[in-house]
Amino acid sequence: MAKPFFLFFLLIICLLSSTPESRRPPPFLGKSPRLLKTQNILVQPKYTYETRYFDQTLDHFSFNDLPKFQQHYLINSNHWVGAGPNRLGPIFIYCGNEGDIEWFAADFVWELTPRFGAMVIFPEHRYYGESMPYGSQKEAYKNASTLAYLTAEQALADYALLITNLKRNLSAEASPVILFGGSYGGSKIFSNNFNKN
């Protein structure tokens, strides 16, 4: 008897704590930003970023001589206070999910960057969007040996290498890095930080 009541109570709490914005279906399969309805006028959010590519390692855990691939990422430093003697702006990283990174770039992280003087980076997950090993999706998804590098561990190593390289190039080695993610991207952060033996 207690279990059905608990589930009903949990459902009511979830419904009451959600907002109309959170109940809207996600904008899948498109590159256009979400449209916000304000007094019957459609307004596009002002998220601007620079698109860049990083020469990424295919296998971080072996000595095999494998080809590199171009990892697609988005970056915005408009609000970053930089990394200097008297300031240490954080770097916010949104860990890419199973799709084109531009689908996930309209996220709450943008609202936090001015408040914290942060830079924001959206690295794309390998084997998704434009971050295709072997040059194309057809070749990358060809067989089990080409798909063998599609793992959470390889993706986390991609992020670590990209972040280390960016911090060195920006003279921001001491800047803190805060990782964000939802769904699969968030589970990579959680599982690799909290499930250590």
Image (spheres, rainbow, N blue to C red):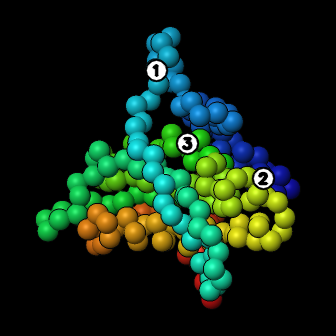
The image position of residue 186, as x and y in percent, is 59, 60
Mark toward the start of the polypeptide (1 vs 2): 1
Residue located farthest toward the bottom when viewing the structure as drawn: 197
The image position of residue 46, as x and y in percent, is 40, 31
Q: Which of 57 and 19 is in front in this view?
A: 57
**Is residue 173 among the parts visible in the rendering?**
yes
Where does label 2 land, which residue? 138
Q: Distance between the residues labelled 1 and 2?
A: 37 Å
**1 and 2 marks in contact (CB < 8 Å):** no
Q: Which residue is drawn at 59% across and 62% down?
A: 69
* Amino acid type, label 2: Lys
Where does label 3 land, which residue? 102
**Residue 43: numbered disc:** 1
* Amino acid type, label 1: Val
Name the mark nearer the viewer: 1 or 2: 2
Q: Is residue 51 left or right of residue 70?
A: left
